[in-house]
Amino acid sequence: MLLAIWASVMCKKEFILMVGLPRSGKSTYVDKHYSAYQLVCPDDIRQGLGVKHDRRLEPFVWAVVEAQLRALMERGRSVVLDATNTLEHVRNRWIEIARNYGYSIKVVWIDTPLSVCLERAKVDNFPERVLLRMYEQLKREPPNYPQDMLAVERIKSPVMQSISEENGA
């Protein structure tokens, strides 16, 4: 059974683009729903470099992310990009790369209320100002694409108001 699931995932060539605030539950969702996919995560690259975030290293981190994506797509592997992707031009860049490799694309937006993310951020001292900046970015540029263009799945937290509700979606 597991071999059949693995084979169908490997043959499909699907790209999953995660979108959501830091501490929204993106990685947890990926672990539960896309464990058979190849994972590309900038946080893992930063961890490998021994840093949480260092502006001097960010261009390197994102170059590695792109190189990993391209290498996996060159091999036809189904891939999940687990990153915040709060800006439309960033999402569009990853979508364009996947299209160029002939991938089906699904955007999964983990739409968790800001208050929940802020509480979770306190646990590991994630900077509140960074989370607030990303919240404003996502509020300005939510991942809304025409249904005939690509699939968008919005996973809304049932507690409190989420970004999509605030924007009237």
Image (cartoon, rainbow, N blue to C red):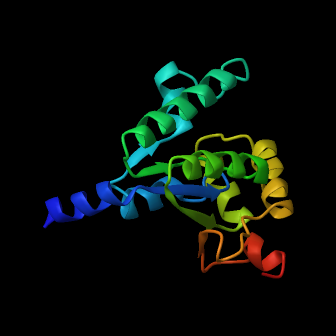
**Residue at 83 percent of width and 48 percent of height:** 133
Q: Quadrant of the C terminus?
A: bottom right
Relative image position of residue 36 (x, y in whole percent): 31, 55
Question: Image quarter for residue 144?
Answer: bottom right
- Residue drawn at point x = 59 percent, y = 63 percent: 107
Relative to residue 154, is residue 56 depicted above or below?
above
Looking at the picture, tell me which residue is in the foreground, 155 or 66. Answer: 66
Q: Is residue 52 visible from the viewing direction of this image?
A: no
Residue 93 vs residue 64: left or right?
right
Q: What residue do we see at 54% from left, 36% from top?
A: 43
Give above or below for 30 relative to 69.
Answer: below
Whether residue 155 can be seen here: yes
Placement of 156 over or under 26, stated as above or below: below
Instruction: Residue at 72% x, 17% y: name it.
Output: 56
Q: Is residue 29 left or right of residue 8?
A: right
Q: Is residue 10 left or right of residue 138?
A: left
**Observer-nearest residue: 101 or 163?**
101
